[in-house]
Image: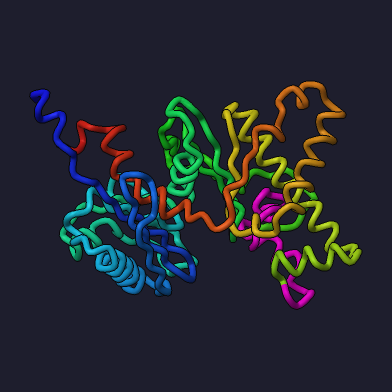
Amino acid sequence: MSSTELLKPQPAVFSIGVDIGGTKTHAVVLAPTGEITHEVTVPTGFGADAVVATAVSAIHGVAEASGIAVRDFSTIGVGIPGAVDPGTGRVSHALNLGLEQLDLGFELETRLGVRVHVENDVNAAALGAFHTLALPASASMGYLNLGTGLAAGLVLRGELWRGSRGAAGEIGHILVDPHGPLDLDGQPGGLEVMASGSGIARQWAHHGDASVTAMFQAAATGDAAAITIRDRLFDGVAASVRILVLTLDVDLVVIGGGITAVGAVLTEGVTAVFDSWSEASPFIGSLELAGRVKFVPHGTPVAALGAARLGAHVLSAHPQEVA
């Protein structure tokens, strides 16, 4: 390429990211600067046909809002719950969406006529959080999602790490209290039952409003059962951070998800657990756990942002696969 060609302005490259959730699907257009220029939210359908139709509607809707044809976007990515094979775009066991098996990538590409990258939603959110915080490419980060479930996404030296079978980061199934409450997977005292929306709902269900907010409100009034569940939540979040640091020694653990909406009470409660551990163990204190935690600004659509970057992520990581 000549020096004259290098001086020519390069065309802007826009991408679409879609976050398919249990009740709503959020699509964004991401500018080359990393800013969201347009976004669309639609209700998520239930079952294979409805989920595909939802994704297609969201992609067409946000493309139309931006004034850019679907075929002209540099990449289109989709984050979805369940086990995802990113190579084929096949989704398995997304039970809250009514999906046992769905070749989502193939179905979307057939309807849209363009390549679509599909990834597990927590992995997509990890990638979105990594770029939202503008971490250096050499950095390693664990993204801890505290939502309906509990899981982590891993970005090691700037690249998603899925593990040999795609189970890397599924720490919600790690058992930390053999005498704890029973989780949906049939095991007692797992991190997910301690520190997720569904786990808290299972523990607090007999109180009517089983939401995390209701549980925190009851704890603030001195309700003994709520205080036990709240403190178990703090312990579970702190244990999740400790596991990510001790197994991978990541530079940073970033926490996001719906439970973080409770705000400072969560931060303060988890920090108090870290402090108690540090007092009891100089080694744990040396890890500086509290200083290695950041919370995603509430309302940041990290899953959609990460999905929008999936194509570029594949291009940079595996250039030989996209000739």
Q: In the rendered structure, which segment of residues is drawn in magenta?
A: 184-209
What is the x, y in percent for residue 237? 69, 46
Left or right: residue 235 versus residue 155 is right
Magenta stretch prevailing secondary structure: helix
The quadrant of the image that shows the N terminus is top left
Q: Residue at x 29, y 39 (%)?
A: 314
What is the x, y in percent for residue 148? 59, 61
**Can you see residue 177?**
no
Q: How is the image coloured?
A: rainbow
Compared to residue 315, the image places residue 216 above or below, namely: below
> Of 128 and 314, which appears nearest the observer?
128
Left or right: residue 167 versus residue 233 is left
Q: Residue at x 69, y 44 (%)?
A: 175
What is the x, y in percent for residue 309? 35, 45
> Of 98 and 237, which appears nearest the observer?
237
Q: Residue at x 21, y 36 (%)?
A: 321
Q: Residue at x 84, y 63 (%)?
A: 219
What is the x, y in percent for residue 11? 18, 44
Compared to residue 320, the image places residue 116 above or below, namely: below
Q: Is residue 195 magenta?
A: yes
Compared to residue 104, the image places residue 57 above or below, namely: below
Q: Is residue 153 magenta?
A: no
Q: How many marks?
A: 0
**Can you see residue 166?**
yes
Quadrant in the picture for residue 61:
bottom left
